[in-house]
Image (spheres, coloured by chain):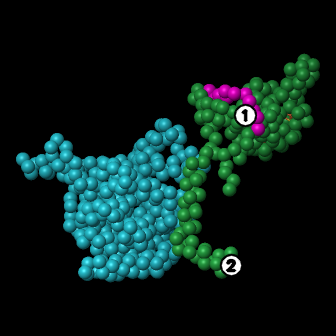
Chain colours: A cyan, B green
Amino acid sequence: MELVVALGLIVFKVAFLIAILLLLPLPLTWLERKVAGHMQQRMGPMRVGWHGLLQPVADGIKLLTKEDHIPAEADRFLFKLAPILALAPPFVVFVAVPFGESVSVLGTEITLYVSNMNVALLFVFAVIGIEVYGVIFGGWAANSKYAVLGSLRTCAQMISYEIPMGFAVIGVVMLAQSMSLLDIVRAQADVWNVVYQPVGFFVFFVAGLAEAQRIPFDLAEAEGDLGAGFHTEYSGIRFAFFMVSEYAIVLLVSVLVVILFFGGWNGVLVPLPPLLWFVLKVAFFVYLFIWFRFTFPRYRYDQLMAIGWKVLLPLSMANIIITGVLLGAVAAP
Amino acid sequence: MSRAQYRVGTWIGWGFFADLANGLALTFGYMFSRPVTMQYPDQEKWLPYPRYRGHHFLKRDEEGEIKCVACELCAQICPCDCIEVVPYEDENGKRHPAKFEIDTARCLFCGLCEDACPADAIALGQQYEFSSFSSRDLVIGRDDLLAKPGKAATGGGVVAARLNTKKDVLVETEETQGYDWWRNIRRT
Ligand code: SF4
Ligand code: SF4
């Protein structure tokens, strides 16, 4: 009986998570277009529903009913595989991401995470790395020059941001003495990590922008110079997969920033429910992503590589060394 | 402040991303400015200027007689060959068009027919909402042309309007004061 309840809970949590991740892109696209519109003194979508609220639904229906076209010269297997490769990892990653401690429903304690891995951070980085293959394969398989250029840029981009990103979180791990995201949040109960690790946060956030392939680092898409980059040749539901994947990663990076550097669900000053604190913080970072997108121009990919190798990498390494020295100095009596 | 100091200040500013923060502040400010969008046809409608070249119309003289003398000059000059005039002679021996058709699907609204007309009978008016599901409906006959609205009198105004799916865009007010295009545009 115990086992059945536990299993049922896990299945329920996973289903709930998938539903949220699949549905959240709808309001996010609306928000993005609205914010874009108002920043450019337009109104954004206005026709479908109140202030265009139903526009994402209309877009979804359109994408679902459109012809699913595969170019004649494309590598059909890779072409079909790529959207799935892009979509699955962000979903898988959320298995390891906690959203809070626990809530009690009907006398049962329900933890707000699917699993508490002791190597959660490692798992997150390992799995999210796979997502890039979706982008690379998608561009390669389409057999179109714009798509190939998009995926070439992704390769160049990936090697320059993944390493600083990994290094940036080592300082956090040193502070929490654990790789479990739960323990990392618990260690920030008094002071958020961003106070101790401002450089780590900076490096992680910039690398996160590159990870999510958003302006100023959306080189793989670059609608100005590459059509739509790696998904130029995609249409219909496969294109929707890439879109959902993009928003899931934006969400993931925001969640990670909040968990690693902004105290997760630990509140400050105002006593709000922990989950609400968490949602508010994540919402702020998602907004920041959108805000960045409509403020900054795109970097060239040699510039991105220069930033990655010449600025972020030394910074994150210095961050590790200084954190280590300071921790040692504090620990030593 | 000396030049060197200024330069150092700029570098320190870059170090703390002052330029990026400026950009973010600017876009954030714009986010709460009023949009310049004109919500046609849901809420507003733009009235054309007198010089606007919209749908053609045929004029009548003081006696109510059609001005056109069916000389076919407009049909001759039309670069799209979209005017067809068939003349007839009435009991007073005056020429008038028995048939006057303009294929607005082909017309490019150059206004050459208006310029060529010796009788000042045809002109391009202010109507600009005549889309149709069928290109046949865009061939406009003589009587329809006589009924079309003429040149705009004032123009450039924006009036409240609302979409009527059955007929046309309904204009609700008649005030046509000039429209300030810079109304909501921030000048910094
Ligand atoms: S406006 Fe130009 S194209 Fe149209 S009917 Fe007149 S002459 Fe022909
Ligand atoms: S509209 Fe003018 S140019 Fe055309 S046939 Fe009549 S009189 Fe001649």
Q: Secondary structure at mark 2?
A: helix
Q: Answer yes or no: is residue A25 visible.
A: yes
Direction from residue B106 to residue A44 in the image, left or right: left
Q: Are marks 2 and 1 in contact (CB under 8 Å)?
A: no
Q: CA distance from mark 2 to mark 1?
A: 61 Å
Mark carried by residue B116: none
A87, A42: nearer the viewer:
A42
Across and down, in percent, residue B115 comes to: 86, 41
- Mark 2 closeness class: few <14, some 14–19, many ≥20 residues within 10 Å: few
Image location (x, y in percent) of residue A316: 39, 77
Secondary structure under tag 1 reads loop
Q: Which mark is residue B127?
A: 1
Observer-nearest residue: A43 or B71? A43
- Give the farthest residue toward the right: B92
Identify which residue is drawn at 33% across, 74% down: A171
> Does the magenta segment cover residue B142?
no
> Toward the viewer: A197 or A291?
A197
Q: At x 35% / y 52%, what residue is drawn?
A: A277
Q: Residue at x 67, y 28 (%)?
A: B171
Q: Is residue A276 above or below residue A249?
A: above
**How many C-alpha atoms fall within 10 Å of the one at disc 1: few (<14), some, or many (≥20)?**
some
Q: What residue is pinned by disc 2? A: B3
Q: Is residue B173 magenta?
A: yes
Segment tinted magenta in the rendering: B167-178
Badge count:
2
Tag 2, which chain?
B
Q: Is mark 2 within 8 Å of ligand 1?
A: no
Counting from the top left corner in percent of width and height, residue B72 is at: 85, 35
Q: Is residue A122 left or right of residue B83?
A: left
**Label 2 sits on what residue type?**
Arg
Q: Which is nearer the N-term, disc 2 or disc 1?
A: 2
